[in-house]
Image (spheres, rainbow, N blue to C red):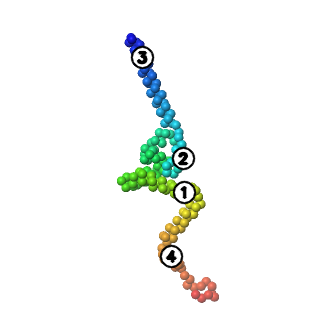
Amino acid sequence: MNKRSLRKAYSDVSLEIKRNFREKDEQEQEEEQKVKQVKCDCCGIEEECTMKYIEEVKELYSGKWLCGLCAEVVTERCRKHPPEALGMQEALDWHKGICEAFNSTTRVNPKLDFTQSMRKIAKRSSQNRSPNLSTGSKISRSISCDPRLKG
């Protein structure tokens, strides 16, 4: 075999390798750009996201995918409480509990949730009143408005 045919064979192989790498990169980019419907592990809302974004979010939140709003709440909860006191899993569990309570009342029956909220407000309001005001009015009549009544 002469040098020229050897160079040609080497050139053909290197071009084939480059083409294979380029095709593989294009396929990976297409895969990353594909949009997938994904459901939030806390609130259950579904969003369309790229596979790359889904993987990034799962890495941040212990393998769970969170929508933007839930991610902000969990991140804020972790920020307010030191990591040694409250870990990521505890923050996720705490927020998931809130979402489940919301989904089981407000989403199912908004009127019932409104009624429960008003009941809580009334209860807090009555607890915050001073005991002197709840026993009776401080205002009393000293003289009757009607001259026939003497008080």
Q: Position of residue 104 (x, y in %)?
A: 54, 57
Q: Closer to the N terminus: mark 3 or mark 4? A: 3
Which type of secondary structure does the marked residue at label 2 adopt? Answer: strand
Residue drawn 52% across the image and 46% down it: 39
The amino acid type of the residue labelled 1 equals Ser
With 68 as the anchor, is 145 left or right in this view? right
State the CA–CA distance, disc 3 to disc 4.
Answer: 100 Å
User: Which is more foreground, mark 2 or mark 4?
Assistant: 2
Instruction: Name the disc covering residue 133, or none.
Output: 4
Where does the C terminus fall, quadrant-wise?
bottom right
Circle 2: residue type: Glu
In the rendered image of this protein, does residue 53 appear above or below residue 107?
A: above
Measured Cα–Cα span from mark 1 to mark 4:
38 Å
Above or below residue 52? Residue 139 is: below
Residue in the picture at 42% in, 54% down: 90
Q: Helix or strand or loop: what does disc 1 sit on?
A: helix
Q: Which residue is mark 3?
A: 9
- From this view, report whether residue 28 is shown above or below residue 95: above
Please say if 123 is above or below 12. below
Which quadrant is home to the N terminus?
top left
Q: Which mark, by number, is residue 104? A: 1
Mark 3 to mark 1 CA distance (whole Å): 69 Å
Asked if the residues shown at circle 2 and circle 4 are in contact, with their CB atoms under 8 angstroms apart, the answer is: no
Residue at mark 2:
46
Residue type indicated by callout 4? Leu
